[in-house]
Image (cartoon, rainbow, N blue to C red):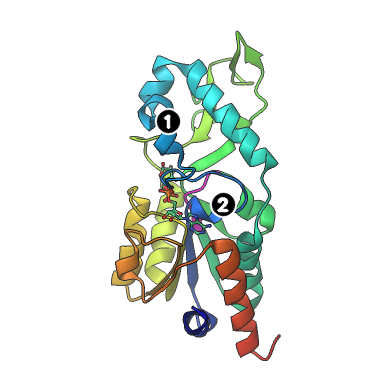
Protein backbone atom coordinates (compact mmCIF):
# COMPACT_ATOMS: atom_id res chain seq x y z
CA UNK A 1 0.00 0.00 0.00
CA UNK A 2 2.86 2.40 0.85
CA UNK A 3 4.04 2.32 -2.76
CA UNK A 4 0.56 3.11 -4.05
CA UNK A 5 0.25 6.00 -1.60
CA UNK A 6 3.55 7.40 -2.88
CA UNK A 7 2.30 7.03 -6.46
CA UNK A 8 -1.01 8.72 -5.60
CA UNK A 9 0.87 11.51 -3.82
CA UNK A 10 2.94 12.13 -6.97
CA UNK A 11 -0.21 12.39 -9.10
CA UNK A 12 -2.23 14.52 -6.65
CA UNK A 13 0.81 16.65 -5.79
CA UNK A 14 0.98 17.78 -9.44
CA UNK A 15 -2.76 18.48 -9.69
CA UNK A 16 -3.81 21.97 -10.75
CA UNK A 17 -7.55 21.28 -10.59
CA UNK A 18 -8.33 18.60 -7.98
CA UNK A 19 -11.92 17.51 -7.45
CA UNK A 20 -12.73 15.28 -4.48
CA UNK A 21 -16.00 13.30 -4.64
CA UNK A 22 -17.10 11.98 -1.25
CA UNK A 23 -19.80 9.61 -0.04
CA UNK A 24 -20.95 8.18 3.27
CA UNK A 25 -17.69 6.27 3.84
CA UNK A 26 -15.99 9.64 4.34
CA UNK A 27 -18.02 10.16 7.54
CA UNK A 28 -18.02 6.58 8.79
CA UNK A 29 -15.01 7.13 11.08
CA UNK A 30 -16.89 10.08 12.54
CA UNK A 31 -19.60 7.69 13.70
CA UNK A 32 -22.11 8.51 10.94
CA UNK A 33 -23.48 5.25 9.48
CA UNK A 34 -23.22 4.54 5.76
CA UNK A 35 -26.18 3.37 3.69
CA UNK A 36 -25.07 0.10 2.11
CA UNK A 37 -22.28 -1.32 4.29
CA UNK A 38 -23.12 -4.73 5.75
CA UNK A 39 -22.21 -3.71 9.30
CA UNK A 40 -23.96 -0.37 9.69
CA UNK A 41 -25.69 0.40 6.39
CA UNK A 42 -28.94 2.24 7.04
CA UNK A 43 -30.57 0.66 4.01
CA UNK A 44 -29.72 -2.79 5.34
CA UNK A 45 -31.97 -2.06 8.35
CA UNK A 46 -34.58 0.37 7.04
CA UNK A 47 -36.50 0.67 3.80
CA UNK A 48 -35.62 3.91 1.98
CA UNK A 49 -39.06 3.84 0.33
CA UNK A 50 -40.57 4.23 3.80
CA UNK A 51 -38.27 7.03 4.92
CA UNK A 52 -36.53 8.90 2.12
CA UNK A 53 -39.05 9.59 -0.65
CA UNK A 54 -41.65 12.36 -1.16
CA UNK A 55 -44.35 9.65 -1.13
CA UNK A 56 -43.16 8.39 2.27
CA UNK A 57 -43.31 11.93 3.65
CA UNK A 58 -46.79 12.45 2.16
CA UNK A 59 -47.92 9.15 3.69
CA UNK A 60 -46.41 9.55 7.16
CA UNK A 61 -44.58 12.84 7.87
CA UNK A 62 -44.33 11.97 11.55
CA UNK A 63 -42.36 8.73 10.83
CA UNK A 64 -40.08 10.54 8.39
CA UNK A 65 -39.45 13.33 10.91
CA UNK A 66 -38.65 10.76 13.60
CA UNK A 67 -36.08 9.21 11.23
CA UNK A 68 -34.44 12.54 10.40
CA UNK A 69 -34.47 13.68 14.04
CA UNK A 70 -32.63 10.43 14.89
CA UNK A 71 -30.09 11.02 12.11
CA UNK A 72 -29.65 14.70 13.04
CA UNK A 73 -28.72 13.62 16.57
CA UNK A 74 -26.01 11.33 15.17
CA UNK A 75 -24.61 14.19 13.05
CA UNK A 76 -24.76 16.55 16.05
CA UNK A 77 -22.67 14.08 18.09
CA UNK A 78 -20.25 13.51 15.20
CA UNK A 79 -17.00 15.40 14.64
CA UNK A 80 -14.87 15.65 11.49
CA UNK A 81 -12.31 12.82 11.35
CA UNK A 82 -8.63 13.00 10.23
CA UNK A 83 -9.80 12.33 6.66
CA UNK A 84 -11.89 15.53 6.61
CA UNK A 85 -8.96 17.52 8.00
CA UNK A 86 -6.56 15.99 5.46
CA UNK A 87 -8.76 17.34 2.65
CA UNK A 88 -8.56 20.78 4.26
CA UNK A 89 -4.76 20.49 4.41
CA UNK A 90 -4.70 19.74 0.67
CA UNK A 91 -5.93 23.31 0.15
CA UNK A 92 -2.55 24.58 1.40
CA UNK A 93 -0.70 22.30 -1.00
CA UNK A 94 -2.68 22.62 -4.24
CA UNK A 95 -4.04 25.49 -6.33
CA UNK A 96 -7.59 24.06 -6.36
CA UNK A 97 -9.47 21.59 -4.16
CA UNK A 98 -13.23 21.37 -4.78
CA UNK A 99 -15.15 18.87 -2.63
CA UNK A 100 -18.31 17.49 -4.23
CA UNK A 101 -20.20 15.60 -1.55
CA UNK A 102 -23.23 13.32 -1.44
CA UNK A 103 -23.20 13.59 2.34
CA UNK A 104 -25.85 15.65 4.08
CA UNK A 105 -23.82 16.01 7.26
CA UNK A 106 -21.82 19.23 7.58
CA UNK A 107 -18.52 17.58 8.50
CA UNK A 108 -16.55 18.91 5.50
CA UNK A 109 -17.68 22.45 6.34
CA UNK A 110 -16.99 21.97 10.06
CA UNK A 111 -13.49 20.68 9.24
CA UNK A 112 -12.85 23.87 7.25
CA UNK A 113 -13.07 22.84 3.58
CA UNK A 114 -13.57 26.14 1.77
CA UNK A 115 -15.20 24.95 -1.47
CA UNK A 116 -17.86 22.28 -0.87
CA UNK A 117 -20.63 21.42 -3.34
CA UNK A 118 -23.33 19.53 -1.36
CA UNK A 119 -25.43 17.68 -3.95
CA UNK A 120 -27.90 15.93 -1.64
CA UNK A 121 -28.79 18.85 0.66
CA UNK A 122 -28.14 19.44 4.34
CA UNK A 123 -29.75 17.35 7.07
CA UNK A 124 -29.45 20.07 9.72
CA UNK A 125 -31.52 22.46 7.59
CA UNK A 126 -35.31 22.35 7.04
CA UNK A 127 -37.38 23.63 4.13
CA UNK A 128 -40.94 24.90 3.69
CA UNK A 129 -43.10 22.34 1.83
CA UNK A 130 -44.95 25.29 0.27
CA UNK A 131 -41.72 27.11 -0.78
CA UNK A 132 -43.61 30.14 0.52
CA UNK A 133 -40.80 32.60 -0.26
CA UNK A 134 -41.17 31.91 -4.00
CA UNK A 135 -38.40 29.31 -4.27
CA UNK A 136 -36.68 26.83 -1.94
CA UNK A 137 -37.39 28.35 1.47
CA UNK A 138 -34.79 26.88 3.79
CA UNK A 139 -34.30 27.70 7.46
CA UNK A 140 -32.48 26.37 10.54
CA UNK A 141 -33.73 23.04 11.79
CA UNK A 142 -35.40 24.71 14.78
CA UNK A 143 -38.73 25.43 13.05
CA UNK A 144 -41.63 25.91 15.52
CA UNK A 145 -43.42 22.62 16.14
CA UNK A 146 -47.23 22.38 15.98
CA UNK A 147 -49.13 19.13 16.66
CA UNK A 148 -45.75 17.43 16.89
CA UNK A 149 -44.58 18.39 13.38
CA UNK A 150 -42.05 21.13 12.52
CA UNK A 151 -43.60 24.05 10.69
CA UNK A 152 -42.28 26.76 8.37
CA UNK A 153 -41.51 29.83 10.53
CA UNK A 154 -42.71 32.10 7.68
CA UNK A 155 -46.06 30.60 6.68
CA UNK A 156 -46.79 27.78 9.13
CA UNK A 157 -46.90 25.09 6.40
CA UNK A 158 -45.37 21.71 7.17
CA UNK A 159 -41.57 21.79 7.17
CA UNK A 160 -39.39 19.02 5.70
CA UNK A 161 -35.71 18.14 5.99
CA UNK A 162 -33.74 20.06 3.34
CA UNK A 163 -32.31 16.91 1.74
CA UNK A 164 -32.79 15.29 -1.69
CA UNK A 165 -35.06 12.23 -1.51
CA UNK A 166 -35.11 9.36 -3.98
CA UNK A 167 -36.98 10.45 -7.09
CA UNK A 168 -36.26 14.16 -6.50
CA UNK A 169 -34.03 16.45 -8.55
CA UNK A 170 -30.72 17.57 -7.16
CA UNK A 171 -30.23 21.32 -6.62
CA UNK A 172 -29.75 22.50 -10.23
CA UNK A 173 -27.02 25.10 -9.66
CA UNK A 174 -24.97 22.80 -7.45
CA UNK A 175 -25.23 19.95 -9.96
CA UNK A 176 -24.27 22.22 -12.87
CA UNK A 177 -21.20 23.50 -11.03
CA UNK A 178 -20.30 19.95 -9.99
CA UNK A 179 -20.42 18.85 -13.64
CA UNK A 180 -18.32 21.81 -14.79
CA UNK A 181 -15.56 21.32 -12.22
CA UNK A 182 -15.67 17.57 -12.91
CA UNK A 183 -15.08 18.09 -16.63
CA UNK A 184 -12.23 20.52 -15.89
CA UNK A 185 -10.56 18.34 -13.26
CA UNK A 186 -7.10 16.91 -13.95
CA UNK A 187 -7.42 14.56 -10.95
CA UNK A 188 -10.56 13.24 -9.22
CA UNK A 189 -10.11 11.70 -5.77
CA UNK A 190 -13.16 9.50 -5.04
CA UNK A 191 -13.59 8.75 -1.34
CA UNK A 192 -16.09 6.47 0.38
CA UNK A 193 -18.86 6.01 -2.15
CA UNK A 194 -20.36 2.81 -3.57
CA UNK A 195 -20.93 4.80 -6.77
CA UNK A 196 -24.41 3.40 -7.39
CA UNK A 197 -26.75 6.40 -7.00
CA UNK A 198 -27.32 8.58 -10.05
CA UNK A 199 -26.70 11.27 -11.16
CA UNK A 200 -23.68 11.61 -8.85
CA UNK A 201 -22.47 8.13 -9.77
CA UNK A 202 -21.92 9.40 -13.33
CA UNK A 203 -19.42 12.10 -12.28
CA UNK A 204 -16.35 9.81 -12.07
CA UNK A 205 -16.87 8.52 -15.61
CA UNK A 206 -17.50 12.13 -16.76
CA UNK A 207 -14.12 13.08 -15.26
CA UNK A 208 -12.46 10.00 -16.74
CA UNK A 209 -13.81 10.70 -20.23
CA UNK A 210 -12.62 14.30 -19.94
CA UNK A 211 -9.09 13.02 -19.32
CA UNK A 212 -8.82 13.17 -15.51
CA UNK A 213 -6.86 10.63 -13.52
CA UNK A 214 -9.05 8.90 -10.95
CA UNK A 215 -7.80 7.77 -7.55
CA UNK A 216 -10.15 5.93 -5.17
CA UNK A 217 -9.99 5.63 -1.39
CA UNK A 218 -12.32 2.89 -0.20
CA UNK A 219 -11.72 -0.29 1.86
CA UNK A 220 -13.99 -2.14 -0.59
CA UNK A 221 -14.23 -2.17 -4.35
CA UNK A 222 -17.03 -0.02 -5.75
CA UNK A 223 -18.66 0.78 -9.09
CA UNK A 224 -15.87 3.36 -9.55
CA UNK A 225 -12.88 1.08 -8.95
CA UNK A 226 -12.58 -0.05 -12.58
CA UNK A 227 -12.05 3.59 -13.65
CA UNK A 228 -9.40 4.30 -11.01
CA UNK A 229 -5.74 4.52 -11.96
CA UNK A 230 -5.06 3.75 -8.29
CA UNK A 231 -7.29 2.14 -5.66
CA UNK A 232 -6.12 2.80 -2.10
CA UNK A 233 -8.08 0.09 -0.28
CA UNK A 234 -8.26 1.46 3.22
CA UNK A 235 -10.32 3.79 5.43
CA UNK A 236 -10.39 7.49 4.55
CA UNK A 237 -9.41 8.56 8.06
CA UNK A 238 -6.12 6.67 7.74
CA UNK A 239 -5.32 6.90 4.03
CA UNK A 240 -5.97 10.62 3.43
CA UNK A 241 -3.58 11.84 6.16
CA UNK A 242 -0.93 9.46 4.77
CA UNK A 243 -1.53 10.94 1.31
CA UNK A 244 -1.03 14.48 2.61
CA UNK A 245 2.11 13.46 4.50
CA UNK A 246 3.51 11.84 1.35
CA UNK A 247 2.80 14.99 -0.70
CA UNK A 248 4.53 17.11 1.95
CA UNK A 249 7.50 14.70 2.03
CA UNK A 250 7.87 15.05 -1.75
CA UNK A 251 8.10 18.78 -1.23
CA UNK A 252 10.81 18.54 1.36
CA UNK A 253 8.41 18.52 4.26
CA UNK A 254 6.84 21.98 3.69
N1 LIG B 1 -13.44 5.09 4.44
C1 LIG B 1 -13.75 5.16 3.11
N2 LIG B 1 -14.79 4.48 2.56
C2 LIG B 1 -15.52 3.70 3.38
C3 LIG B 1 -15.26 3.58 4.76
C4 LIG B 1 -14.17 4.31 5.28
N3 LIG B 1 -13.85 4.26 6.58
N4 LIG B 1 -16.18 2.72 5.30
C5 LIG B 1 -16.98 2.34 4.28
N5 LIG B 1 -16.59 2.91 3.13
C6 LIG B 1 -17.19 2.80 1.80
C7 LIG B 1 -17.96 1.54 1.54
O1 LIG B 1 -17.08 0.51 1.10
C8 LIG B 1 -18.92 1.98 0.44
O2 LIG B 1 -18.32 1.80 -0.84
O3 LIG B 1 -18.14 3.84 1.69
C9 LIG B 1 -19.11 3.47 0.73
C10 LIG B 1 -20.48 3.81 1.26
O4 LIG B 1 -21.41 3.52 0.25
P1 LIG B 1 -22.95 3.89 0.49
O5 LIG B 1 -23.33 3.45 1.85
O6 LIG B 1 -23.69 3.41 -0.70
O7 LIG B 1 -22.96 5.49 0.53
P2 LIG B 1 -22.94 6.49 -0.70
O8 LIG B 1 -22.16 5.93 -1.84
O9 LIG B 1 -22.52 7.80 -0.18
O10 LIG B 1 -24.51 6.54 -1.09
C11 LIG B 1 -24.88 7.48 -2.07
O11 LIG B 1 -27.21 6.94 -1.62
O12 LIG B 1 -28.94 6.55 -0.14
C12 LIG B 1 -28.34 7.49 -0.94
O13 LIG B 1 -28.52 9.79 -0.57
C13 LIG B 1 -27.85 8.66 -0.11
O14 LIG B 1 -25.95 10.09 -0.55
C14 LIG B 1 -26.36 8.73 -0.42
C15 LIG B 1 -26.26 7.99 -1.74
Q: Position of residue 75 (x, y in %)?
A: 63, 40
166 or 182: which is nearer to us? 166
Which residue: 34% across, 47% down? 197
In which quadrant is the C terminus drawn?
bottom right
Which residue: 40% across, 18% down? 58
Cα–Cα span, label 2 and label 1: 19 Å
Q: Position of residue 253 (x, y in %)?
A: 70, 87
Task: Identify the residue position indicated by label 1 in the image.
Answer: 46
Question: CB at mark 1 closer than 8 A to ligand 1?
Answer: no
Residue range (magenta): 100-104
Q: Position of residue 18 (x, y in %)?
A: 49, 72
Disc 1 is placed on an element classified as loop
N-term-proximal mark, 2 vs 1: 2
Binning the other alpha carbons within 10 Å of mark 2 as few (below 14), some (14 to 19) or many (20 upward) gives: many
Which residue: 28% across, 70% down? 209
Task: Identify the residue position indicated by label 2 in the image.
Answer: 27
Amino acid sequence: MQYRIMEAAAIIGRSQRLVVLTGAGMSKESGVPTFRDEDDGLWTKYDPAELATPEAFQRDPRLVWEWYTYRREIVRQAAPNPGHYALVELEDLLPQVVVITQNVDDLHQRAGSSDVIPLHGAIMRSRCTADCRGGPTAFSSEAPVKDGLPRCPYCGALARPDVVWFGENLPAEALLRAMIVTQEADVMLVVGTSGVVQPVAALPSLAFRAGATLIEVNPNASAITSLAALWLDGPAGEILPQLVAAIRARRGGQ
